[in-house]
Each structure stands twice: as C-alpha cells, then as structure tokens.
Image (spheres, rainbow, N blue to C red):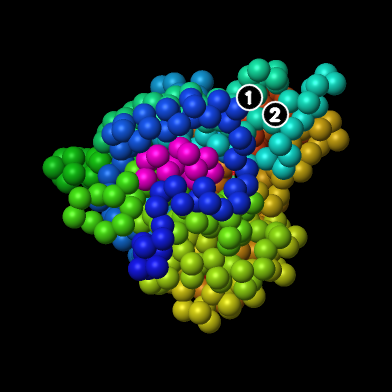
Amino acid sequence: MSEVAQKDWNPLSWKEKPVKQLPKYPNQDKLEENYKTLKSLPPLVTSWEIEVLKDKLSNVAAGNSFLLQGGDCAESFDATTAPKIVNMVKVLLQTSFILIHEMGVPVLRVGRMAGQYAKPRSSDFEMVDGEEIHNYRGDLINGFKSESGTRIPDPDRLIEGYHKAGLTLNFLRALADEGFADLHHPEQWELDFMQNNEYYKEYEDMVSSITKAVRFVESIAPDTFSTLQKVDFYTSHEALNLYYDSAQTRPVPRKKGHFNLSAHMVWLGNRTRDLNGAHVEYFKGINNPVGIKIGPPFEIDETLKLIETLNPTHEAGKIVLITRFGKDNIERQLPELIRAVRKEGFPVVWSSDPMHGNTFSTNGGVKTRNFDDILSEVRSAFDIHRAEGSYLGGVHLELTGDNVTECVGGAKGLNEKELDRNYETFCDPRLNYEQSLEMAFLVAREWKKSYL
Ligand code: PEP
Ligand code: CO
C-alpha cells in the first residue's frame, strides 16, 4: 500500500465516500452493535494464507499456472449443508484435475464460497402485489422471500453470514485435507452425458488417465500420496457489503497494512468500481489479492487509473482483471484493453468471466445462459490473448456441483422447456455438474491451442 493510502486510510474511511449497492439499515443501533461484535470475532482466514495466494497468483501473471475461480452466483444461508458443500468441492476439484491433466501446469482453486452472500441489483425496489418492497440483495442483507418484512435490511444477517461462512470454511478445509479421496474411482466421474458428443473419446481417455495416475501414485509411493492429499483451496467473494468486509479487516502483528481476514481474495464488482466511490476507497487499503470485474460500460483510462490506485507499487499477483464483456462485445473491447494495460507495464492476472455478459431471459421470463455463448466468449478470450501475445491465466465461472437446470445447452442439450425442472439459483444461472466438467475440458483445449 502506498504511504498516502496508509496515512489517510482506515477500514471505515469508505464511509466518507458515495456508496452504491449498500442499502440503509433502518436499525442503525443494531448495525453498530453487530459491527462491533463482528470486529471482535476471530478471523476466518490468516494473513499468511493470503500472502501465499498472492505469491501463487504472481506465478499465474508470469504465465506459469492457471486460476480457476468458481462457485455459486449467490450462496444462500440455507444451503450451508453437507451435501451442497461436498458437491461444490467435488466439482471444483474435478474441474481443476481436468485442467491440470490437460495443461500440465499448477491450477489455483479459488471458490466463490464461504462469504459470497451479497448481490448488486439494478434497482433498490420491486413491486409485489401492488406493494413496493426492497429488492433481494443476498442473504447477508435481507431474505429472499418476497414479503416486505423479510426484505428489510437486517444487521443480524452480518453475524449469521460470518457463522455460515465459518461453518462452510471449516468443512471445506476438512474436505480439502482429504484431497484425492474417492476421485481415483472412475465411477466418481460422470461419463455418460458426453456419450453423443464429438469429444466423448477424448474425454473418456482423459478421465481414465486421471484416475490411473492417482492410483499409480497411491500404489507405488503411499508416502508421496499422503503429502499430495492436502489440496490447496482458497475462498473469495465480492466485497460488496462493506460493513461485513471492513469489520473483518485488521492489522496483523509484525506486518504492514491491513488484511481482509474474511476471505483470501475479494473482488470489486462491475457496478461498484467508481474511482471516487466507497468500494474503491475500501479496496485501496487491503493487502489481499483483489479481482476487478471489467465489462460494459467501462473506459480504458478509468480502468488504468483504477489498477494504479489499487496497486500503486505494481506488485505482481495483486490484481486479477476479470473481463466479462459478453460474446458480442469481446472482440471489440478486449484487444485495446490488453494493449493499454501492457503499455503501463501492470503485472495483472487476466481472467475471463464468460458468464455475466451472456445472461438473457427466455420468452417465459426465465433468466438463463447458453452453454455455447459462454464457450464462445471463452474461445474469443483465448484467441484474442494469443493474438496479442498475452497470457489468459484464468476463468471465472458460476457453477454448482448439483444437477440443476439453469443454463441451456451443453452435451446433453438442455432446452428452455426443461429449465423449470430444477431451477434453484437465488441469482444468476449456473453451469450444472456435467456442464462444468464439459466446460473445464473445453477451456483446457483452448488453453492448449494457445499456449502449448
Ligand atoms: C457476479 O460476479 O455475480 C456479479 C454480479 O458480477 P459483475 O459485477 O461482473 O456483474
Ligand atoms: Co452472478
């Protein structure tokens, strides 16, 4: 952090700036009381884990590894259950194995997990049965049920969010310690859904090779295997509810500056990245690696200023630029951004979020995304980076380990009529388990075309 930022900055200095996407809590006394409580509770992650992640991200920026960031659009408190967490960890592990196997480089797993509870919305209110009520802003702020009482911003949710994040993280760490358990059994991998797909043989060979490799290591060197058992897993969320994030932002003994100890990495959303706004002020003062979502509307100059503001010392591994232009805009907007960032010499990690620019509603009013549109943005992102001599080092996906029906397409050819079969998301449509494995496989193919 620059000297200037250190002098003027504190975890609450954002309050002096215009704040977007954060509703007024009617009960201010309760808000203050809960803020103090949250401030006194133990951290969820540690500063050394954060520093290790930043170091590993600098390796991604240098072109030597790959970042897989993924998870729910919005986690819900009610989904803090063993099956949901197990399925999420499983899909993130399996997709990462596909990437590692195909690319032959280390893959960093960063979940949109254990704190992804707050959402930006395009309007503050909605009409329900002739009554104007607050829009749902994520479980960290209000309840999903469309009743005026449930939708009032409730400060108790800050504390509940902390507890739910802690429970999720505790189980996540235990599962990550088990590492490869079970994944060497081919039956833990879905194959059938790819059967009629042009890549079926390639996919089947890959799964067989992954499971054989794990069994091989297990049989010839059990000790090596036990050290392999612990897999790295990091957490991230959009730092949108600045009360939640700033209450967990602290100095750490013998280290300079402040760390957001609620997650390893946090990101700045596309709607809250105004240079003079509260969110940017908050992000200026934390040592965590930070993601910046960039999509329409945006300006190159402003983006460069933003990167400079958040990383004045040009530390490698600090900034992950997550582009989310949409399949029809990327060709026009990404090349210029890559050139401008390179000209400034900023050592950023480039990541592609092919989800958020490709959302649409069906005629029946269901919010969805098409697998082919998502893939199209991924392909364009790789093509453009390759053509510019730049390294696309990551993808940012909304996915779930569950068998939901939220995005259309994929090898099984899910159609719009089938969406209501198991449409569970509280916010944006996610790739389901099979679509996620297929996407990882296709991402790896694109990466290989560009960088092998
Ligand atoms: C999100 O990641 O869920 C999100 C709201 O993204 P963006 O800020 O890019 O719209
Ligand atoms: Co989303």
Q: Amino acid at mark 2?
A: His
> In the rendered view of the protein, which quadrant contains the N terminus?
bottom left
Residue lying furthest left: 223
Q: Residue furthest bottom?
A: 343
Look at the numbered disc 1 and give the secondary structure of its residue.
loop
Q: Position of residue 74 (x, y in %)?
A: 56, 35
Question: In the visual, does 381 lie left or right of 86?
Answer: right
Q: CA distance from mark 2 to mark 1?
A: 7 Å
Category of crowding for the residue at label 2, using alpha-carbon neighbours closer than 10 angstroms: few (below 14), some (14–19), many (at least 20): many
**Image height check: is 338 above or below 354?**
below
- The residue at the point 81 percent across, 33 percent down is 365
> Which residues lie in the magenta part?
235-249
- Crowd around label 1: few <14 · some 14–19 · many ≥20 (10 Å): many
- Quickly name the residue at label 1: 152
Up the image or down, 31 lies above or below 204; here it is above
Q: Which corner quadrant holds the C terminus?
A: bottom left
Q: Are marks 2 and 1 in contact (CB under 8 Å)?
A: yes
Q: Give the residue number, with chain letter if any, for mark 2.
A: 134
Q: Is residue 19 magenta?
A: no
Q: Earlier in the sequence, mark 2 or mark 1?
A: 2
Callout 1, which amino acid?
A: Ile
Q: How many marks?
A: 2
Q: Is residue 126 above or below residue 52?
A: above
Q: Nearer the viewer, residue 76 or 210?
A: 76
* Picture quadrant where residue 167 is located: top left
Viewer-proximal residue among 3 and 347: 3
Residue at 33 percent of width and 53 percent of height:
258
Residue 284: % across, % down: 45, 59
